[in-house]
Amino acid sequence: MPDYIVRDINLAPSGRLKIDWVRQHMPVLNAIREEFEATQPFQGIRVAVCIHLEAKTAYLAEVLKAGGAQVSIAGSNPLSTQDDVAAALAVAGLNVYSWYNATDEEYKDHLLNMIDDGPDIVIDDGGDVVQLLHTERTDLAEKVLGGCEETTTGVLRLRALERQGGLKFPMIAVNDAYCKYLFDNRYGTGESVWSGIMRTTNLICAGKTVVVAGYGWCGKGIAMRAKGMGAKVIVTEVDPVKAIEAYMDGFHPMHSLEAAKLGDIFITVTGCKDVFSGKHYQVMKDGAILCNAGHFDVEVNKPDLEAMSTGHRTVRKDIVEYALKDGRKLYLLAEGRLVNLAAGDGHPAEIMDMSFALQALSARYVLEKSKELGKKVYVVPKEIDDRVATLKLKSLGVAMDVLTPEQEAYINNWNHNT
């Protein structure tokens, strides 16, 4: 019998409908599932999955299970777990530890329950599982063959741990694969962030001034979508190269304090803390909207908002209004957590099809190569990236050219006169 901690097991039928819907729109994972069912690469292996627990993640977990894995799963964000999806996975025989709106204590307890199942492979989102395996559950870290990391924030944490010489097992930086950041981070984040903002606020984007803090691949996608919907877009950055890139892309790089005076909607996507804080709130317009698309709820400084306000109230689902002492009102979406997941359904299924295909194939790679890999952070092998791209093109009915033997010889010959 599966072990589970879910809000209501009776919600399973609704969750199953959601999982079945995304399955129809994830052809790459479907192809990998067929292969896994035939070869059973994870037979006898316990895989711990800690990613936002909604339908697309659930289907990844089921693909791993189809490949023979014993799967334990927990959500990577207290506000992104969908209780009906969690229930559906429990009914399907997975160990599930998650519910929506968990307290900090409950959230940690869910992760610890998953880790205590004794994973051989971990699939992480933001590094919370890896952190616990390196702090409170070091005894179980010895069993871990390796794992995969989904996010920019998580990869940054892993590389810092590797530099300090403390990483206890190999990790694949799935976030850094071409088929991840070029599509998931740019198109997935770009679309899902605006979907979350617009369905939460029911306000128009066109004509507004949008401030995007951070011009990595996620920031590029958010800015591009805002521009396409008719917004005026300001970008704030700490990297001079990215600031020039934003300028060349037609946006307006600006110091955050100056941008704070102009923005109608502020979106943080940096992976750092205190991106917007008291000094920014002092000069923001009455009615300005703040939200976060980075991993943790520290980019928009909530304690400063509390300290500067006379009180706050929830004015719509996932919108908290802060009444400042000078009479202005600022609005925070989704408690400063990921607006596209805490106030939305996350990235489109067709996008996560590629990202989760990378996860599934990278997990198998870790299993196959565990004796060869050192305790380092590794890039996704090119053959995995290319395989996912090829499967995606096939699903779209798109053909591509292939080099002839003569072209291969030419392009690989340093002397073009021979």
Image: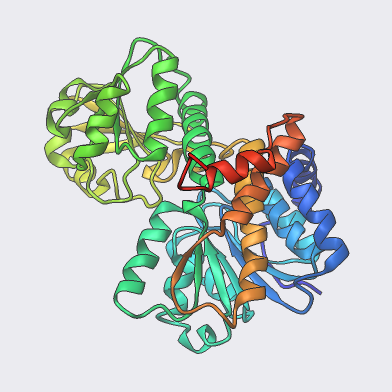
Locate residue 106 relative to residue 322 in the image: left or right. right
Position of 353 compared to 261: left or right?
Answer: right
- Residue 402, quarter of picture: top right
Q: Nearer the viewer, residue 117 or 199?
A: 117
Q: Is residue 315 visible?
A: no
Quadrant showing the N terminus: bottom right
The relative height of residue 352 versus residue 137 in the rendered view (above or below) is above
Q: Would you say residue 155 is visible in this rendering?
A: yes
Q: Quadrant of residue 382?
A: bottom right
At 76% across and 41% down in the image, what residue appears? 27
Task: Kindly indicate the quadrant of the structure image that contains residue 221.
Answer: top left
Residue at point 62%, 77% (across, down): 119
Expressed as whole percent of the image width and height from the top left, the position of residue 407 reads: 62, 38
Residue at screen point 61% across, 57% down: 359
Residue 18 image point, x, y percent: 74, 42
Horizontal side of residue 35 vs 107, given as left or right? right
The reply, left or right, for residue 142 in relation to residue 261 is: right
Query: In the orientation shown, which residue stands out farthest toward the right?
Result: 38
Pick the residue in front: 357 or 349.
Answer: 357
**x 24%, y 23%: residue:** 263
Percent coordinates x, y for residue 379 in the rendering: 49, 60
Q: What percent of the width, then of the height, locates residue 169?
A: 49, 78
Number of numbered discs overlaid on the protein picture:
0
Residue 356 or 113: which is nearer the viewer?
Answer: 356
